[in-house]
Amino acid sequence: MSLAIAPARTAAARIDTTRTPLRSAPAPAGTAPVGPSPEAPVAAPRVRAVPEGTEARGFVLYVGIDESKADADGTTLHRIVEALRALTGEIAPSAETYAAVALAPAGAGGRDVDVVRLALQDPAALAKQRDAGETRNDADRHPNGVIIDISRKRVLLDGEPAGLTYKEFELLQFLVLREGRTIDRHELIENLWSAEDEVPSERTIDVHVRRLRSKLAHYQDIVRTVRGIGYRFDRHADVSIRQASTPSPDLY
């Protein structure tokens, strides 16, 4: 979710709260000051990092939180937006506000705030993604390691297709999108097999994971077994994950 307060002309502008007092000229010798000395005017706070010839017209605040996290905090995205709007109106009644919700594919991984910045076309985030894309393109020309391409539903091992079945890819994708979290067998069954006529047992899940790991060959340790609990995906330096984000419509 992102709240934009007035049009933003610059990114990462900071308010400089340091003030330099203006000093009055000393009185000529032999004269006494008349009345109390007026206070020197104080310079207004200025916005730093604004290029010459431009002016700050507002700012953008990116808020990274999904609906489930908001619910766990006892609130909703709409209530957060309205609270921020109310606070802005209290502090600066003349400010204009505009808010938009950033959407991404269901279950998409990554930090919420990074997804928001990309979906709302933040220039710095787009530049970072572009640089990362150029690095990945170099890796495609000289492929090494694992490429998990969620958008194309494929896995490459050192440039060669891993040959996963649809269900094996679904299983890997489910773990990848929950990177670093241990997923128990019951959660895998509930999310990947609940719509099927025959629901597998937990032992069957172990068989599916074993087949998946065998196809990952010498990279099989990216899918780790957590004894007595379930499975976890751990990203290594030689693992690249690709997925597309969806631009958001204006919902608020």
Image: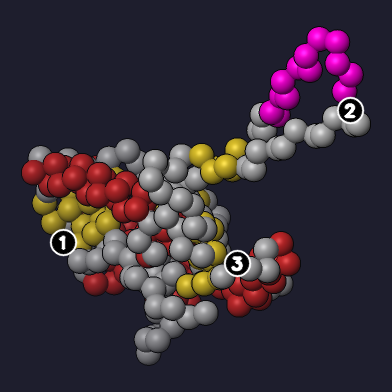
* Image disc number at residue 200: none
Dot 1: element: loop
Please name which of the two marks, 1 or 2, marks the residue nearer to the observer.
2
What is the magenta range?
21-33
Residue most extreme to the top: 29
Q: CA distance from mark 1 to mark 2?
A: 92 Å
Residue 25 place in picture, x, y as percent: 72, 20
Q: Label 3: few (<14), some or many (≥20) within 10 Å? A: few
Q: CA distance from mark 3 to mark 1?
A: 56 Å
At x 60%, y 67%, the residue is 95
Answer whether residue 68 is magenta in the image.
no
Q: Which numbered circle lies on residue 34?
A: 2
Q: Per the image, is 25 magenta?
A: yes
Q: Earlier in the sequence, mark 1 or mark 2?
A: 2
Location of residue 239 (image quadrant): top left
Neighbours of disc 2 within 10 Å: few (<14), some (14-19), many (20+): few
Q: How is the image coloured?
A: secondary structure
Residue 163 got which mark? 1
Q: Nearer the viewer, residue 242 or 82?
A: 82
- Residue that label 3 marks: 95
Q: Nearer the viewer, mark 3 or mark 1?
A: 3
